[in-house]
Protein backbone atom coordinates (compact mmCIF):
# COMPACT_ATOMS: atom_id res chain seq x y z
CA UNK A 1 0.00 0.00 0.00
CA UNK A 2 2.35 2.80 1.15
CA UNK A 3 6.08 3.00 0.38
CA UNK A 4 6.80 3.01 4.09
CA UNK A 5 5.01 4.18 7.20
CA UNK A 6 4.33 7.92 7.25
CA UNK A 7 2.47 9.65 10.04
CA UNK A 8 0.90 13.01 9.31
CA UNK A 9 -1.46 15.60 10.80
CA UNK A 10 -3.82 17.81 8.81
CA UNK A 11 -3.25 21.55 9.02
CA UNK A 12 -5.83 23.06 6.65
CA UNK A 13 -8.02 22.39 3.60
CA UNK A 14 -6.35 23.35 0.31
CA UNK A 15 -9.25 22.45 -1.96
CA UNK A 16 -12.28 20.28 -2.58
CA UNK A 17 -13.50 18.51 -5.69
CA UNK A 18 -15.64 15.65 -6.90
CA UNK A 19 -12.82 13.23 -5.91
CA UNK A 20 -12.66 14.39 -2.27
CA UNK A 21 -10.57 16.94 -0.35
CA UNK A 22 -6.92 18.01 -0.44
CA UNK A 23 -5.32 18.95 2.87
CA UNK A 24 -2.04 20.58 3.77
CA UNK A 25 -0.43 18.32 6.35
CA UNK A 26 2.77 17.99 8.31
CA UNK A 27 4.51 14.63 7.98
CA UNK A 28 7.13 12.61 9.80
CA UNK A 29 8.42 9.37 8.33
CA UNK A 30 8.76 6.49 10.73
CA UNK A 31 11.51 3.89 10.42
CA UNK A 32 14.93 3.75 8.82
CA UNK A 33 14.16 6.55 6.35
CA UNK A 34 13.34 9.05 9.11
CA UNK A 35 15.94 11.56 7.85
CA UNK A 36 14.29 11.57 4.42
CA UNK A 37 13.99 14.97 2.70
CA UNK A 38 10.28 14.20 2.46
CA UNK A 39 9.66 15.09 6.11
CA UNK A 40 7.76 18.35 6.44
CA UNK A 41 4.78 19.72 4.55
CA UNK A 42 2.87 17.36 2.28
CA UNK A 43 -0.51 17.31 0.57
CA UNK A 44 -3.07 14.67 1.52
CA UNK A 45 -5.70 13.89 -1.11
CA UNK A 46 -8.51 12.15 0.75
CA UNK A 47 -11.85 10.54 -0.09
CA UNK A 48 -14.38 8.40 1.74
CA UNK A 49 -13.22 4.84 1.01
CA UNK A 50 -16.45 3.84 -0.77
CA UNK A 51 -15.93 6.78 -3.18
CA UNK A 52 -12.16 6.44 -3.60
CA UNK A 53 -11.84 4.41 -6.82
CA UNK A 54 -10.50 7.40 -8.79
CA UNK A 55 -7.89 8.06 -6.07
CA UNK A 56 -6.88 4.40 -6.07
CA UNK A 57 -6.41 4.56 -9.85
CA UNK A 58 -4.43 7.79 -9.46
CA UNK A 59 -2.17 6.05 -6.92
CA UNK A 60 -1.41 3.26 -9.42
CA UNK A 61 -0.53 5.80 -12.12
CA UNK A 62 1.64 7.83 -9.74
CA UNK A 63 3.47 4.66 -8.66
CA UNK A 64 4.37 4.05 -12.31
CA UNK A 65 5.57 7.66 -12.68
CA UNK A 66 7.46 7.91 -9.38
CA UNK A 67 10.75 8.73 -11.16
CA UNK A 68 9.22 11.50 -13.30
CA UNK A 69 10.51 14.86 -12.05
CA UNK A 70 7.82 16.84 -13.87
CA UNK A 71 4.95 15.74 -11.61
CA UNK A 72 4.39 15.98 -7.88
CA UNK A 73 6.07 13.20 -5.94
CA UNK A 74 3.92 10.35 -4.65
CA UNK A 75 4.94 9.17 -1.18
CA UNK A 76 2.31 6.48 -0.68
CA UNK A 77 -1.23 5.93 0.50
CA UNK A 78 -3.03 4.75 3.57
CA UNK A 79 -6.43 4.20 5.12
CA UNK A 80 -7.63 6.22 8.08
CA UNK A 81 -10.76 6.29 10.20
CA UNK A 82 -12.22 9.60 11.31
CA UNK A 83 -15.43 9.74 13.36
CA UNK A 84 -16.13 6.13 12.39
CA UNK A 85 -15.78 6.79 8.63
CA UNK A 86 -13.04 5.14 6.54
CA UNK A 87 -10.92 7.33 4.25
CA UNK A 88 -8.43 6.50 1.49
CA UNK A 89 -5.53 8.98 1.49
CA UNK A 90 -2.84 9.77 -1.08
CA UNK A 91 0.33 11.30 0.35
CA UNK A 92 1.76 13.75 -2.18
CA UNK A 93 4.42 16.40 -2.51
CA UNK A 94 3.04 19.80 -1.49
CA UNK A 95 3.10 22.19 -4.45
CA UNK A 96 3.47 25.50 -2.63
CA UNK A 97 2.94 27.54 -5.80
CA UNK A 98 -0.54 26.08 -6.34
CA UNK A 99 -2.07 23.90 -9.01
CA UNK A 100 -1.16 23.53 -12.66
CA UNK A 101 -4.26 25.61 -13.41
CA UNK A 102 -2.93 28.39 -11.13
CA UNK A 103 0.41 28.38 -12.96
CA UNK A 104 -1.24 28.55 -16.38
CA UNK A 105 -3.44 31.48 -15.29
CA UNK A 106 -0.44 33.28 -13.79
CA UNK A 107 1.70 32.71 -16.90
CA UNK A 108 -0.95 33.29 -19.58
CA UNK A 109 -3.15 36.12 -18.32
CA UNK A 110 -5.22 36.14 -21.55
CA UNK A 111 -6.74 32.67 -20.98
Image (cartoon, rainbow, N blue to C red):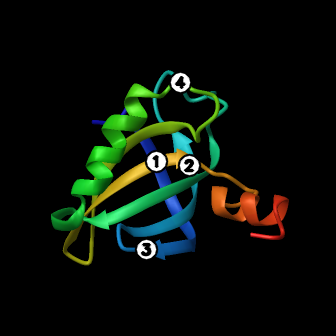
Q: In this orientation, does residue 93 appear?
A: yes
Q: Which mark is residue 91?
A: 1
Closer to the chain start, of discs 1 and 4, is 4
Circle 2 SS class: strand
Q: Quadrant of the N terminus?
A: top left
For mark 1, does the 10 Å Cα neighbourhood hold few (<14), some (14 to 19), or many (20 or more) residues?
A: many
Q: CA distance from mark 1 to mark 4?
A: 16 Å
**Residue that badge 4 annotates:** 33
Determine crowd level at label 2: few under 14, some 14-19, many 20+ residues with C-alpha closer than 10 A. some
C-alpha separation, residue under disc 2 versus residue under disc 1? 9 Å
Label 3 with label 1: CB-CB less than 8 Å? no
Q: Are marks 4 and 2 in contact (CB under 8 Å)?
A: no
Query: Going from the N terminus, do you reach mark 3 or mark 2 first?
Result: 3
Q: Find the distance from the CA under tag 4 to the CA under tag 2.
A: 13 Å
Q: Relative to 53, does residue 22 appear above or below in the rendering?
A: below
Q: Position of residue 41 (x, y in %)?
A: 65, 52
Q: Which numbered mark, 4 or 3, is in the foreground of this view?
A: 3
The quadrant holding residue 51 is bottom left
Q: CA distance from mark 4 to mark 3?
A: 32 Å
**Closer-to-camera residue (27/87):** 87
Residue tagged by mark 2? Answer: 27
Where disc 1 sits, the SS reads strand
Q: Residues within 10 Å of mark 4 (few under 14, many from 20)?
A: some
Mark 3 residue element: strand
Q: Write the residue at 56% across / 29% down.
A: 34
Q: Which residue is mark 3?
A: 17
Q: Which residue is located at x 67 percent, y 31 percent? A: 37
Using the numbered discs, state the Cα–Cα distance from disc 3 to disc 1 in whole angstroms. 17 Å
Amino acid sequence: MAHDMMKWSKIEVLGKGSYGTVFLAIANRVGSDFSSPFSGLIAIKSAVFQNSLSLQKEAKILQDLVDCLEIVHYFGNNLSIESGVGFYNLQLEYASEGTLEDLIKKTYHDL
